Image (spheres, rainbow, N blue to C red):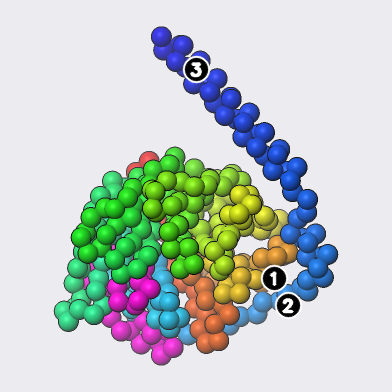
Amino acid sequence: MSDDVSERIHAARKEAEHMNEEIRQNREQQNDTTFKQACEELNVKDLPRCAMRVRRTLRGHLAKIYAMHWSEDNTHLVSASQDGKLLVWDGLTTNKIHAIPMRSSWVMTCAYSPSGGFVACGGLDNICSIYNLRSNDVPIRVCRELNSHTGYLSCCRFFDDRNIVTSSGDMTCILWDIEAGSKVSEFNDHNGDVMSVSLIPEKPNYFISGACDATAKLWDVRSGKCCQTFQGHESDINAVHYFPNGQAFGTGSDDASCRLFDIRADRELIHYTHDNILCGITSVSFSKSGRYLFAGYDDFDCNVWDVLKGDRIGILRAGLYHYARGEFQYDHPLIHPIRCSRNRHNQQTNSDRSWRRTRR
């Protein structure tokens, strides 16, 4: 009996692989040009070499900074550190506005709500903690703890002040009602730890996720179903980020490549690699114009890519610092900070990267 079941499973896998190959071939037949060819036909000019310098340095954390997120006003940001503090900053003045003690110092993600009234964080405690910045408590205390994941919390992002989506090492994403403190929908389709999610105001009913099964998925929060699955990476996807117009998204993976996927075409448009880059990507973000793609790498550098032509046009050196997940606000006239974490010993980096594998 067991042999018969194994044979049926093996036959089903072969049939699925055959169907996937047919789909890939059909897509290739429809692909009449490439990004680079289109740029040449349209005479798109090359971007100048990207030269950036430090505009602000935000000092205050006493240990490794593992997450940051910008407010939509492009002035305030929140950072989470292993010193057990969640700090809210004014990026222009570099002043600390709030210092919030976290439930657990083993934090992996944080988020700023679109209204600027709430922040959230989570990590190895498996809980998404919500803080109301309008509270009169000093220090600010947690107002909601969202507890349903059975694995570490890898990423969280607010839809609005009432709803937040979280991703986890338990291979699921969850949409929460913050006021009720309850789960609205659970999204189950990944076959590996879900490492990152991305939202965009132009698409309020959808979000993108990337996972260690080397796939990215588009989800509809109304139905709770996966609408599209995007393949192409050969290893874990650590970061996803929507393109500014909401019709595409970028990914960063342990296979040392970033890729741009078009949602309408349901396929990869271009990938960003270099012969000298052999390490994984931990963070990706587009500039506001969408022409620049910033990616943080395990070799402590941030590479800047021309989105249209796929050329590397700059390298931001981090020195003794290791880039993890963060967001970039290039095209902003005043502030361009990039989150990095203290890493004076390589052992720290290796231990950080093993976090998501602790519950496999």
Q: Which mark is nearer the camera, 1 or 3? A: 3
Which residue: 41% across, 70% down?
68
Task: Determine which residue is flagged by label 3.
Answer: 8
Quarter assignment of residue 80: bottom left
The image shows residue 246 at horizontal and vertical percentages of: 54, 64
Q: Which mark is nearer the camera, 3 or 2? A: 3
The image shows residue 126 at horizontal and vertical percentages of: 28, 53
As displayed, is residue 327 above or below residue 21?
below
- Whichever of labels 1 and 3 marks the residue nearer the N terminus, that label is 3
The image shows residue 240 at horizontal and vertical percentages of: 51, 58
Mark 1 to mark 2: distance in Å?
Answer: 7 Å
As displayed, is residue 117 above or below residue 196?
below
In this view, which residue lies farthest toward the left? 137
Q: Does the magenta stretch include residue 105?
A: yes
Cβ–Cβ below 8 Å for labels 3 and 2? Answer: no
- Give the left or right position of residue 16, taking residue 21 as reference: left
- Whichever of labels 1 and 2 marks the residue nearer the N terminus, that label is 2
